[in-house]
Image (cartoon, helix red, strand yellow):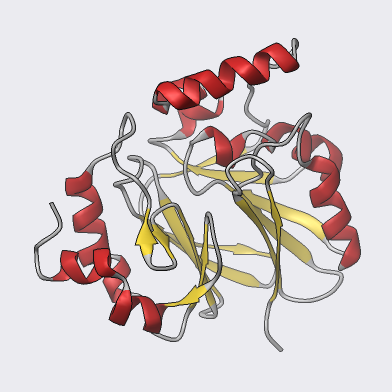
Amino acid sequence: MGLIVDRVVAPYFATNCWIIAPGVGSPALVVDPGIDIPHMAAAISSKLREYKLTMGAVLITHGHLDHTFSLMPVIEECGTAITYVHSFDRDLLKNPEGAMGEHGLGLLNQLRSQMQHLRFEEPTDVREIESDCRLNCGEMELVLTHTPGHTPGSIIATINDEVVVTGDTLFAGSIGRTDLPRGSMTEMQRTLREKIALLEPGLEVLPGHGERSRMEYELKNNPYLRAALVGELA
């Protein structure tokens, strides 16, 4: 039987918060709880109840605010869980402005004006990812791969050899931007060529924004991935 894979789409930036579990009644992996006012905890909790899931762990694919905003409320409402984040992006959990462009800072000011007591903290149980590794969430095996480019601490997660959660590293037909603070097109090109291109074609792609895809399709059709493979991405 395949994985349960569902999502809650954040109202701001349409960030995908993926909810992944091996079956009904199991511990789930919650990926990238994004921005809503006051937060996304209620929507995520409702989705967990729909499948009778508990929250086993939270995965932060990178430290941008549209992927981390609701982290603390989700931990508080849905149950204590381990939070995984790469060490290079951990500081952004408490200081999201460290990787924001002008538009992002404007949004942050807007959110603070609407939520006067808004503050950013990190959960009690944060586990830093330092390099490529394997870990378990209940009956699921996660293969975490460091994929810098969008941010220095971007990571992807291949789960049970069925799906790959790609955050803002790889979208359906596109890639994440690299022009924000801490972004690097050079690193992105290396990531696409040395990490993304090596993923199994049969994997379903669960991106940080937009619709699902499959690696087989992306390997053949994604113009950024194809350009990186021949060294044309600048």
230 or 223, nearer to the observer: 223
Q: Give above or below for 76 relative to 189.
A: above
Is residue 79 in view?
no
Residue shown at the point (29%, 37%) measured from the top left: 179
Residue shown at the point (60%, 37%) measured from the top left: 68
Residue shown at the point (64%, 33%) measured from the top left: 69
Q: Give above or below for 48 relative to 84.
A: below
Task: Please provide percent x and percent y for residue 140.
Answer: 63, 71
Q: Quadrant of residue 172?
A: bottom left
Task: Please provide percent x and percent y for residue 164.
Answer: 49, 69
Which residue is situated farthest in the left direction here?
Answer: 231
233 sits to left or right of 13: left
**Quadrant that contains the N terminus:** bottom right
Q: Give above or below for 73 relative to 112.
A: below
Residue shown at the point (87%, 70%) measured from the top left: 25
20 sits to left or right of 45: left
8 or 78, nearer to the observer: 8
